[in-house]
Amino acid sequence: MSAEMETNIVAVERVKEYSEKEQEAEWRLPGASIPEGWPLEGRVEFRGYSLRYRDDMDLVLRNITITINGGEKVGIVGRTGAGKSSLTLGLFRINEAAEGQILIDGVDIASIGLHDLRFKVTIIPQDPVLFSGSLRMNLDPFEQYSDEEVWRSLELSHLKAFVSTLPDKLHHECAEGGENLSVGQRQLVCLSRALLRRSKILVLDEATAAVDLETDCLIQTTIRKQFEGCTVLTIAHRLNTIMDYTRVIVLERGEIVECGAPGALLQAKGPFYNMAKDAGLV
């Protein structure tokens, strides 16, 4: 009984922790004006943007100032701890800005509700998130799309053949966290979800770091074809996946140290060249 009590008290501690946790910003902001169909272009602008995780901590991003035009494919690279993932945390307002602004198509993201922001920007994370429930629910939780559209997204993400072999097909029951699917399949489910939503801005947070090279190649090929007119921000684990991108941003200690076309950065023989050399690409 004593051991069971000690185990169960963890739940009480967890509830206490959540009740004391600082709340996020408003989910919907009444009166916030967003243009119809926003974002139409997918232009992302960082203006003197800085970020810290807590008030008593140092800045993890410092004075990030850059404009990413609509339709650009931009790779974000850097050593561990350089601040790559912090950029995406700021873009989704998981953490609020310490200084500066992020604008999407001219709209300051701090001036709109979290629902309006996160519903319009899609991310394929490094750790794919699946919920216990049907496969269809995981792909289309708000039931916005028809079965035909869902099957089309599965076909484009190279999952149609696998789902067709399942006894319940789209109604296949996913275990919590997608434990009854492989890591690669979970990642492709996240890709299917992104293909369904067709957001103007797609973020890949080291999305292919945990999958094999073949699955990585499938994901990259699909993204290049299906998100051709969209803005794609890729936090790159494998540099070869971003060598044909429009631009590469190199971060060091939370600051931009290089930015330009991959070929130009290789010729400059700076930090990006050294990373490419370590990866055996030059």
Image (spheres, helix red, strand yellow):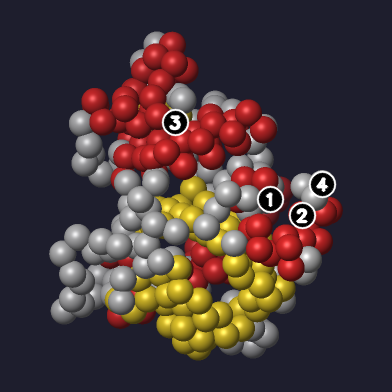
**The disc label shown at residue 239, or none:** 1
**Which amino acid type is shown beneath numbered disc 2?**
Ala
Q: Mark 1 near mark 2, Cβ–Cβ under 8 Å?
A: yes
**Which amino acid type is shown beneath numbered disc 3?**
Ser
Q: Is residue 37 left or right of residue 88?
A: left
Q: Mark 4 near mark 2, Cβ–Cβ under 8 Å?
A: no
Residue to which mark 2 is pinned: 276
Residue plotted at (32% across, 40% down): 196
Nearer to the camera, 238 or 143? 238
Q: Is residue 142 left or right of residue 209?
A: left
Q: Earlier in the sequence, mark 1 or mark 3?
A: 3
Alpha-carbon distance for marks 1 and 3? 22 Å
Q: Report whether residue 142 is seen.
A: yes
Alpha-carbon distance for marks 3 and 2? 29 Å
Nearer to the camera, 118 or 239? 239
Residue plotted at (61% across, 78% down): 61
**Which amino acid type is shown beneath numbered disc 1?**
Leu
**The disc label shown at residue 280, or none:** 4
The local secondary structure at tag 1 comes to helix
Nearer to the camera, 236 or 67? 67
Q: Specify the quadrant of the image occupied by residue 62.
A: bottom right
The local secondary structure at tag 2 comes to helix
**Which amino acid type is shown beneath numbered disc 4?**
Gly
Alpha-carbon distance for marks 4 and 2? 6 Å
Alpha-carbon distance for marks 1 and 2? 7 Å
Seen in the picture, residue 86 relative to 186 is either above or below; the reply is below
Nearer to the camera, 272 or 112? 272
Q: Earlier in the sequence, mark 1 or mark 2?
A: 1
Task: Tell how many labels.
Answer: 4
Closer to us: mark 1 or mark 3? 1
Closer to us: mark 3 or mark 4? 4
Alpha-carbon distance for marks 3 and 4? 29 Å
